[in-house]
Amino acid sequence: MEDDILIQISNRIKERRREKNITVQELASLANVSKGLISQIENSRTIPSLIVLIDIIKALEIDLNEFFKDIRTKSKLSPILIKRKDEYEHFEKEHANGFHYQRILTRFIDHSTVDIVILNLEPNATRPLVETDAFEYKYILAGEIEYQFKEEKIRLSQGDSMLFDGRIPHTPKNLGSQTASMLVVYFFEEKKS
């Protein structure tokens, strides 16, 4: 089980929706929220409020106790954490063809969550502009990537890095003929009530 509660909740919602064989739009309608919000929650792009989370759980027809059963954080964290390459979790995000994510580590640290992934981007990978409710750090491991923002395009090569507010609509494009690879670190801040 993942170390971070946000990821566990996101995965549980997506799994249950798929088990019930309902679409993101159908779940959104049942929970009285937008399709985009469900998509962002399922793809760990935002943290839902408690009220919204409860509405989603009810729409999925899951008992609250059952939903949260087995969701936990590790109580005694070692100051040293080792994660072997074969332990990285593969996952997908919405409307992203040719995007291959591997989660290295997710950890709640002092009022924020850090999610570290490797993104392998195929040469013709496509996805619309997306927004993430986090700051994003990108480090290019291999290849050449162009990041498209609303009004600006930024070209990054191996060894280059970038930090930006993920709430700015964005998407990467692989400029090469080989798979490009980048280290991505998401910094989710705890929302103030």
Image (spheres, rainbow, N blue to C red):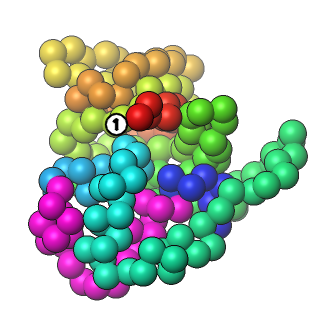
Along the line of sight, the residue nearer the viewer: 161 or 129: 129
- Specify whether residue 144 is in view: no
- Specify whether residue 23 is in view: yes
Q: What amino acid is labelled 1 in the image?
A: Thr
Position of 93 compared to 106: left or right? Answer: left
Residue 52 part of the magenta-drawn span: no
Is residue 49 positioned above or below 176 on the image?
Answer: below
Q: Using the rendered view, name the quadrant where residue 127 is placed.
A: top left
What x and y, as percent, mark residue 175? 31, 31
Q: Is the magenta stretch mostly helix, strand or loop?
A: helix
Position of 102 compared to 13: left or right? Answer: right
Q: Using the rendered view, name the quadrant where residue 123 is placed.
A: top left
Please, what secondary structure does the residue beneath circle 1 have?
A: loop
At a point 15% along the width and 53% down the height, the residue shown is 34
The C terminus appears in which quarter of the rendering?
Answer: top left
Q: Using the rendered view, name the quadrant where residue 173 is placed.
A: top left
At a point 51% along the width and 80% down the height, the residue shown is 66
At a point 64% along the width and 44% down the height, the residue shown is 107
Is residue 136 positioned above or below 47 on the image?
Answer: above
Residue 23 part of the magenta-drawn span: yes
What x and y, as percent, mark residue 5? 57, 55
Along the line of sight, the residue nearer the viewer: 39 or 179: 39
What x and y, as percent, mark residue 1? 64, 67
Q: Mark 1 points at which residue?
A: 132
Look at the image and give the residue range highlighted in magenta.
8-33
Position of 24 compared to 193: left or right? Answer: left
What x and y, as percent, mark residue 19? 34, 84
